[in-house]
Image (spheres, rainbow, N blue to C red):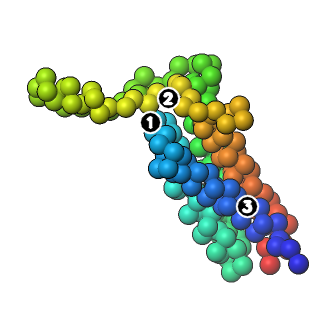
């Protein structure tokens, strides 16, 4: 017997969200791709949204109304994140300007030697340039799709039939 839609869809959302954030960490840690400022901000939606959805899954049998509320909140978090990811994607495609402060952090320099050392170890990552393209989409593009999917699947758990929650 298959799981009810009220659990199946948010469960799929959690798995997709976990896959996306683990892939982002993998590309950073193993692949050496440094995230830009917007990439790091987009990750915050995963860090907040996934625990909300997991709590909803854990409560779905005992407190179905609270689970639906958590699915709604989690979905809203991810859909809001998709707006930021969409903005990031548009900046990469040169549809609009990216943030002016994206590309490096301020460094305190006290001497010419400190300046040269800081310049030699600084690696700037621009929010307006895709570091890699996979199947025609940048990391930001994939993140946009991922967040949209997680948000929509979370909300699928909200609108599932009431008898599917039991």
Horizontal side of 111 relative to 134 (left or right) equals: left
Where residue 12 is drawn, which disc sits there?
Answer: 3
Query: Which quadrant holds the N terminus?
Result: bottom right
Q: Residues within 10 Å of mark 2 (few under 14, many from 20)?
A: many
Gap between marks 1 and 2, in whole Å?
7 Å
Mark found first going from the N terminus, 1 or 2: 1
Mark found first going from the N terminus, 3 or 2: 3
Task: Decide: is 3 above or below 138.
Answer: below
Q: Mark 1 touching mark 2, by CB under 8 A?
A: yes
Closest to the observer, 129 or 77: 129
Expressed as whole percent of the image width and height from the top left, the position of residue 57 reads 67, 70
Gap between marks 1 and 3, in whole Å?
28 Å
Horizontal side of 164 relative to 113 (left or right) equals: right
Closest to the observer, 116 or 44: 116
Query: Which quadrant holds the C terminus?
Result: bottom right
Residue that sits furthest to the right in the current view: 1
Q: Secondary structure at mark 1?
A: helix
Can residue 83 be seen here? no
Q: Which residue in the protein does label 1 denote?
A: 37
Horizontal side of 159 relative to 142 (left or right) equals: right
Q: Residue 117 occupies which quadrant of the picture?
A: top left
Q: Which residue in the protein does label 2 denote?
A: 127
């Amino acid at each position: 017997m298959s799981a009810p839609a009220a659990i199946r869809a948010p469960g799929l959302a959690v798995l997709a969200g976990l896959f996306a954030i683990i892939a982002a960490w993998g590309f950073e840690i193993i692949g050496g791709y440094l995230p830009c400022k917007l990439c790091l901000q987009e990750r915050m939606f995963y860090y907040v949204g996934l625990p909300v959805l997991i709590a909803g899954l854990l409560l779905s049998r005992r407190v179905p109304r609270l689970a639906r509320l958590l699915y709604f909140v989690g979905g809203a978090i991810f859909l809001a994140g998709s707006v930021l990811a969409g903005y990031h994607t548009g900046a990469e495609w040169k549809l609009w300007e990216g943030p002016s402060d994206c590309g490096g952090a301020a460094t305190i320099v006290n001497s010419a030697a400190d300046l040269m050392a800081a310049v030699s170890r600084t690696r700037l990552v621009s929010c307006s340039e895709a570091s890699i393209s996979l199947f025609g989409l940048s990391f930001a593009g994939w993140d946009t799709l991922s967040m949209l999917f997680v948000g929509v699947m979370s909300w699928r758990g909200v609108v599932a039939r009431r008898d599917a929650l039991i």
